[in-house]
Each structure stands twice: as C-alpha cells, then as structure tokens.
Image: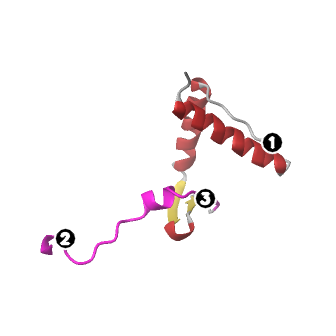
C-alpha cells in the first residue's frame, strides 16, 4: 500500500516537470533527504537577504525585495495569506 501524501507529492512534482517541459524548460526534482537539506540551507541563506516583503493575498503573490535591490516573485495561493497581517477593527478588549 502506498502513502497518499507521498503519492500527492510525486504527482505534483511530475505535473510541474511536465508543464515546464512543454515550455522547453528543463526542471529537476528531488526527494532525497540529503539533497533537500542542501536546498533548505540555500533557501534559508537566500531568505536572509530579504529586506522588504510585499504580500498581496488578492492576487496570490509575494514579492521579496533583496538587499541588492533585486526582486523575487512567488506565486502562491497560501503564502500571501500567511504573511499578511490580520485585520482588526478597534480595540480587541472592547469585544
């Protein structure tokens, strides 16, 4: 019996690689733990260069502005909502 989470991840990765192949752009996929540790470390270093963030939940986009002035755009249905500051109306103690 296969793990449903593993099946979903494998299917998502395969779908993305196939879509990129249609654009004639090669993609690589890894699930290897050592390779993932390397990628996570590189991502942490990259994120540490961020000096400003613009989160736009309405369009599902986050723009990271790095210390050198470059921008990185991330399209995501979840990330902008996670980064957005919750809206509050008035003092919470009043309610």
Residue positioned 58% across, 37% down in the render: 8
Lower position in the chain sequence, tag 2 or tag 1 = 1
Q: Position of residue 25 (x, y in %)?
A: 82, 47
Within the image, what quadrant is residue 67 found in?
A: bottom right
Residue positioned 58% across, 58% down in the render: 66
Q: Residues within 10 Å of mark 1 (few under 14, many from 20)?
A: few
Q: Which residue is mark 3?
A: 75
Q: Which residue is mark 2?
A: 92
Q: Residues within 10 Å of mark 2 (few under 14, many from 20)?
A: few
Q: CA distance from mark 2 to mark 3?
A: 32 Å
Which residue lies most toward the left here?
A: 94
Which residue lies most toward the front here?
A: 1
Labels 2 & 3 near each other (Cβ < 8 A)? no
Labels 2 & 1 near each other (Cβ < 8 A)? no
Secondary structure of the residue carrying tag 1 is: loop
Residue positioned 77% across, 48% down in the render: 20
Could you say which disc has been placed on residue 34 in the image? none
Residue positioned 38% across, 65% down in the render: 85
Q: Is residue 82 left or right of residue 21?
A: left
Secondary structure of the residue carrying tag 3 is: strand
Q: Is residue 70 left or right of residue 49?
A: right
Could you say which disc has been placed on residue 26 in the image? 1
């Amino acid at each position: 019996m296969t793990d449903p989470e593993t099946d979903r991840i494998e299917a998502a990765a395969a779908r993305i690689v196939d879509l990129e192949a249609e654009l004639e752009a090669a993609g690589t996929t890894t699930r290897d733990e050592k390779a993932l540790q390397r990628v996570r470390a590189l991502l942490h270093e990259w994120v540490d260069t961020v000096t400003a963030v613009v989160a736009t939940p309405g369009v599902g986009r986050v723009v990271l502005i790095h210390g050198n002035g470059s921008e990185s755009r991330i399209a995501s249905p979840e990330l902008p909502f996670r980064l957005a500051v919750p809206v509050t109306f008035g003092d919470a103690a009043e309610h």
